[in-house]
Image (cartoon, coloured by chain):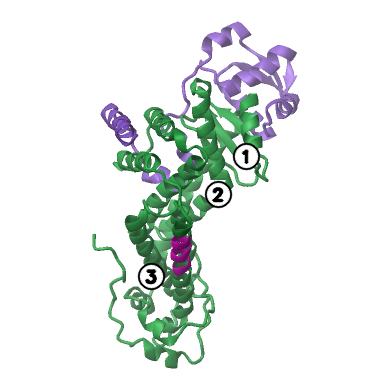
Amino acid sequence: MSSLWHMTVSGTVLIAAAACVRSLFLDRLGKALFPALWLVAAVRLLTPVSVPVPVPAGAMALLPAAGPAREAESAGGFPWLTALWLAGALILAGAMLLRHVRALRQYAQSLPAEDARLAALTAAAGLHRPVSVRVCQTVSTPLTYGFLRPVILLPKDWESCGPRELELVLDHELAHIRRLDVPAKYILAAAACVHWFNPFVWAMCALAERDIELACDEAVLRRAEDDRAAYAMALIALEERRGRDMLLSGFGLRAVRERVTEIMQYRRRGLRGSLAGAAILLCSLTVFATAAAASPAIQGPNVTPTPYPNLFASEEVIPTEAPNQADFMPASSTPDPIPWEPAS
Amino acid sequence: MKLYDSELKVMEVLWDRGETSARTIAQVLAEQVGWSKTTTYTVIKKCLDKKALARTEPGFLCRPLISRQQAQAFATDELVDKLYGGAADRLVASLLGRRRLTETEVAELKKLVEELK
């Protein structure tokens, strides 16, 4: 469980940092940065092994110490926490998979969209993977699925869409394919399953979902700057006719308003913006690596073997000189608040 | 009885060829619309449940129980799964859910576009 705890702490730090960057710079930086930041956090949340990166000793002290969850584990007895966590993760993963497989089965029954315009547009995109455009009666908005052989699904009444709108909508879906958003969403979903108990992870998924769309919008507008209003209107029209989802909650309006605003305020990003974005991403990757490298030291002194085989026992290598390294970590580790947590 | 486009595709094979084995239907549709064998069998099963066709052993021979004209009256534009609204693929998002926008909200968004123009 301690391994999971490390993933939780460093992952949450990355989420909190990304959330800060997002709230400060969403309007000012290229939109591709934000999905990348969420992805770094998600991969960290799913990486149990530490990456051996030399870290200056001083940096260790800055990293969050392990909190109280570990003590509960080492107290002995049946690992209730582990069992509870595992049950939650399995139930959630099962539910997601079931829905997903059912959806895929529906999509498989789609029919090819025989239209020269569509074929020309996808061919012009110049993707390495073969993209097919199909019509599916059971979807109400265009969507993309499939990784190696991506498929763009259009709702049955796609022909009612104006030619320019169709081009923009298709461009958006092609951007999803180009940016490999389908596997990215699988990674996010996996992080949500493993970390179902962590509200930060759910917030990350909700924001990542939005940021992936924003990044694709930006990719479309890069080539269609003058069509901002038409694109925003096409988006609103799609929202208007979309079906009702399983759970009702208030995400709708805020997310769409954000998207519309970002579309209308689209600006070309200069070199400076790209460099700033790259620097932020680099910082995020550094936290990823250092947090991972520091984890053995955190684990250091007071780990007592659990009486039950712990499925999630860390695969980290506990350094033999652990006590020395642990000097940087006072043993009386009070449950630290997570640094950089936004004051809500 | 409501027939969806996918089911009509299977029925069309039967109307064109008369009694046809499930295997042949799968071959025809694999070529025509790129379905896998499993997908075709799933759709055949749906037609069977709706009593649009009858299947007899051996060889899973299928024959249409309704005519082309009858089927046209049954054809539907309705979405099968309004509940999902195409969001089921969105994994996490589908669990978080997202409600449909109200008319007032849509009007508000359109106004926003005008303002930002």
Q: Measured from the top left, where is residue B106 in percent x and y?
A: 31, 30
Q: Are marks 2 and 3 on the same chain?
A: yes
The magenta stretch is: A275-283
Mark 1 or 2: the one toward you: 1
In the rendered image, which residue does mark 2 sit on? A179
Q: Are marks 3 and 1 on the same chain?
A: yes
In the rendered image, which residue does mark 1 sit on? A125
As helix, strand or loop, the secondary structure at mark 3 comes to: helix
Name of the residue lying farthest toward the left? A344
The chain to which mark 2 is attached is A
* Residue A9 tag number: 3
The chain to which mark 3 is attached is A
For residue A170, what is the image quadrant? top right
What amino acid is labelled 3 in the image? Val
For residue B108, what is the image quadrant? top left
Of the numbered discs 3 and 1, the one sitting upstream in the chain is 3
Crowding at mark 3 (Cα within 10 Å: few <14, some 14-19, many 20+): many
Image point (43%, 89%), residue name: A325
